[in-house]
Amino acid sequence: LPPGEPLLRVTGLGKAFGGVKAVDDCSFTVREGSVTGLIGPNGSGKTTVFNLLDGGLGADSGAIELAGRRIDRLPRWRRAHSGLARTFQATRVFPRLTALENLAVPSRSYSTRGLRAGVFTGEEAERAQEWLEFVGMGAYSHHLAGELSYGQQKLIELAQALVLEPRLLLLDEPAAGINPALVERITDIVRKLNAAGTTVVIVEHNMPLVLSLCDHIHVLAQGRVIASGPPHQIERDPAVLDAYLGD
Ligand code: ADP
């Protein structure tokens, strides 16, 4: 990456559903090595931005550059291979596959070979097991995902994203609906990943978590970025407080 070049650059991104502009002329950058927060009131467009970034949705307008290369016209699996992985707000594990088999899904579904859930080579299985251990789920590799707790499923989903060894990891509400001990564990995991060089973008409603974990925050309201800065600045920004009043 050339000096000064952000890992992710979003320029004038737009997406409408019928008459609703969910994302409207949205622009922001993400510095390589950062943990960047994307916050905003309900309906401000955060999840839609993630869907546009990972290719789950196509943008109506604007550009997305990852490490200086346009990715906005690439299909999802090619964006994944360019180093972008994400988790979802509602976990999407395959309940009838084991935890380990769940980690075989991304490498297949994001490849040109098509989806062959639960099937991988010995070497892939070994790496998958290592990622399960990294998120603290090593002992559960042969448990059916559907029999694990919601929090444990979130960890499996996180490991699923990590198997891709992303350069940019998008986390959609990683702390939603889980107990404080697990929130702490996920915080720990994010810090470790970030220390190892992974850039992270987090959508999260838990403000204490966002403020402690992120080094930079973008605030969305009505589909566009209305404020950007370090947590201590965002916390006291009148425009930000204003945007949340109607929430
Ligand atoms: P957030 O994640 O910040 O809560 P969303 O991105 O989910 O916001 O939603 C932004 C706006 O787009 C909302 O008004 C929402 O109702 C609308 N929206 C999102 N997805 C769809 C969809 N698939 N169809 C119609 N409207 C949608």
Image (tube, rainbow, N blue to C red):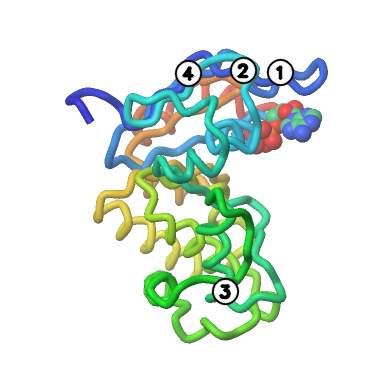
Q: As rendered, which of 60 and 39 lies closer to the eye?
A: 60
Q: Position of residue 42 (x, y in %)?
A: 68, 35
From the image, tell me which residue sits under label 4. Answer: 27
Q: Residue furthest left?
A: 3
The amino acid marked with disc number 1 is Lys
**Residue contact at pointers 2 and 4, CB within 8 angstroms:** no
**Residue contact at pointers 2 and 1, CB within 8 angstroms:** yes
From the image, tell me which residue sits under label 1. Answer: 21
For label 2, count other residues whose C-alpha is less than 10 Å away and answer few (under 14), some (14-19) or many (20+): many
**Residue contact at pointers 4 and 1, CB within 8 angstroms:** no
Identified at 36% across, 63% down, the residue is 188
Mark 4 vs mark 3, foreground winner is 3
The amino acid marked with disc number 2 is Gly
| Label 1 secondary element | strand
Q: For marks 2 and 1, give the CA distance.
A: 7 Å
- Ligand 1 shows up in the quarter that is top right
From the image, tell me which residue sits under label 3. Answer: 101
Mark 2 vs mark 4, foreground winner is 2
Q: Quadrant of residue 90?
A: bottom right
Q: Position of residue 198 (x, y in %)?
A: 32, 49
Q: Position of residue 211 (x, y in %)?
A: 41, 44
From the image, tell me which residue sits under label 2. Answer: 14
The N terminus sits in image quarter: top left
Q: For marks 2 and 3, give the CA distance.
A: 37 Å
State which tag comes first along the sequence, 3 or 1: 1
Q: Position of residue 131 (x, y in %)?
A: 40, 69
The C terminus sits in image quarter: top right
State which tag comes first along the sequence, 4 or 1: 1
Q: As rendered, which of 123 and 10 lies closer to the eye?
A: 123
Identified at 30% across, 60% down, the residue is 192
- 92 over 13 or under it: above or below: below
State which tag comes first along the sequence, 2 or 1: 2
